[in-house]
Image (tube, coloured by chain):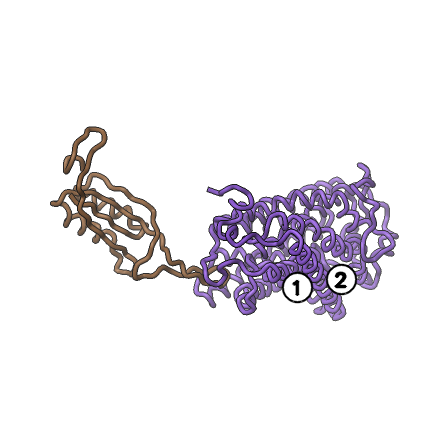
Chain colours: A purple, B brown
Amino acid sequence: MTKLSKFLFSTGALAASAVAMAGPAFADEAPAPVLNTGDTAWMLTSTALVLLMTIPGLALFYGGMVRKKNVLGTLMHSFAITCLVTVIWAVVGFSLAFSKGDSDYIGNLDQFMLNAIGVADLWAPLNIPTSVFMIFQMTFAIITPALITGAFAERMKFSALLWFTGLWSIIVYAPVCFWVWGGGFLGGAGVLDFAGGTVVHINSGIAGLVAAIIIGKRKGYGVENLAPHNVTLTLIGGSMLWVGWFGFNAGSAGAANGAAGMAMVVTQIATAGAALSWMLVEWMTHRKPTVLGIVSGAVAGLVAITPAAGFVTPGGALLIGIVAGIVCFWGAAWLKPKFRYDDALDVFAVHGLGGITGALLTGVFAAEAIGGKVGVLEGNIAQLGLQIEGVLVTLIWSGVCTAILLFLIDKTIGLRVESDAESEGLDINQHGEMVH
Amino acid sequence: MKLITAIIKPAKLDEVREALLKCGVQGLTASEVSGFGRQKGHTEIYRGAEYAISFVPKTKVEVAVSDAQVSGVIDAIRAAAATGNIGDGKIFVTELGHAVRIRTGETGDDAL
């Protein structure tokens, strides 16, 4: 969310001319923030909800989709990344993403080790403590690299995973977050991303696609049975993602207000629409309405409504959800087999394509009456161009940096476990444990 | 004595148990197994990807009976386990050389 839109939501002033105004200049004119206890309580709650999305939500969602020999290794990915990125975010990540200096491309190091955060500091233009804003954003920084792990599931060395996701959070996540939300050039230009469709989902989705291609297919892909070992875990995890996403989207209003309420409403509606559309398309094309399908559709809908949550009407949200369910199913069931890349848990299909669908349709369906932003349907065709710019910049930066990072790690410590270890499973081989 | 081993659909276990009790069988052993016959497994679909699952979950029922009971037990299992569809399973009969009841030391038909 841009500073501009934060200001609009926190004050309720939905100025028609807002589109033309530059964020930082406008923010300078904002009144000094005053601590709002209701807003603060909601943001503390939202922070806990978004953390729940990664542990145990995403861990279980992915953990159920792998084979039994890789369950613990997969759960470990999300849990270890939660710990690693927490430390990185505290040391440099938050500063690089949100400490605006002279550059429009990266934050400065004024917030190194969170040194500059005082107990009483408030995060303008919101009316919440800086500490709360920082840790709310930390939970976004955590889930983004954790999402990527689905692409290279069941075959990456754990040491390589730590190096990759740690460096990725500094080199890819922090800058993109800065560009869109921290005062950088994309948010400044007017690219709309309410809760992280670009920053979180397109960013992780394209990184997943690149990673899946570079690390290569799983042993036995297309020959052996690679079916999920426990879709029950996936449904539990997917449901936790859904509930946690209320913190993600409604929390991105930055306040306990009508914008948060409407964000929650459109999130629920888009998610249901996408779950049903995925289920129906799969039912028509593959004969059965599957549990994995409806849960995957729900996540696709959550992803797609993320950039739009503060800007579209319930009707727009329903259409975004329905389209996302179909597009993401197409990505998983047609695009992936067609090009034969082994994006094991469909990170690109669900987060990449879902994020792009949401980012573009935000530009189409943005309704002035909801978030003060005007989309194509209300005559502002330029917004779609801005959305495309945001998508392309993220695809290129994340894709190229991911490729370079993985190449360097492969040449130094190696990306992939040995062939025998892969057959044996990551659980016993990498972690010395078995699930049961 | 004979050992009768029946591979049946898991959902049919309770009906087979009832039928066996009615024809005088005192006990049986059931285990979860997987395998395939002419049915050649089944297909599972995950996000549009179809996997041929060659080992289908089945239940194996083992029951030791006296020679006189054999045909009655086979008929009872067939009647209870049949659906008429592919995958109903098989019944195998093997010679049983010896049997001992652990608690009392009884042997042969007395141990069954």
- Disc 1 marks which amino acid? Ile
Question: Is circle 2 on the same chain as circle 1?
Answer: yes
Drawn side of residue A216 relative to residue A9, left or right: left
Q: Is residue A227 above or below residue A335?
A: above
Q: Is residue A130 above or below residue A379?
A: above
Residue at position x 13%, y 45% from top? B67
Drawn side of residue A135 relative to residue B36, left or right: right
In-front residue for pair A111/A360: A111
Drawn side of residue A212 relative to residue B9, left or right: right
Residue at position x 48%, y 54% from top? A228
Residue on which disc 1 sits: A356
- Which quadrant does the N terminus of chain A fall into? bottom right
Q: CA distance from mark 2 to mark 1?
A: 13 Å
Label 1: which secondary element: helix
- First in sequence: mark 2 or mark 1? 2
Q: Position of residue B83 (x, y in %)?
A: 26, 57
- Disc 2 marks which amino acid? Val
In the rendered structure, the residue with mark 2 lies on which chain?
A
Residue on which disc 2 sits: A191
Residue B24 visible to an observer of this rendering: yes
Estimate how packed mark 1 is, as few (under 14), some (14 to 19) or many (20 or more) residues with alpha carbons within 10 Å: many
Residue A310 visible to an observer of this rendering: no
Drawn side of residue A351 relative to residue A363, left or right: left
In the rendered structure, the residue with mark 1 lies on which chain?
A
Quadrant hosting residue A392: bottom right
Residue found farthest to the left: B68
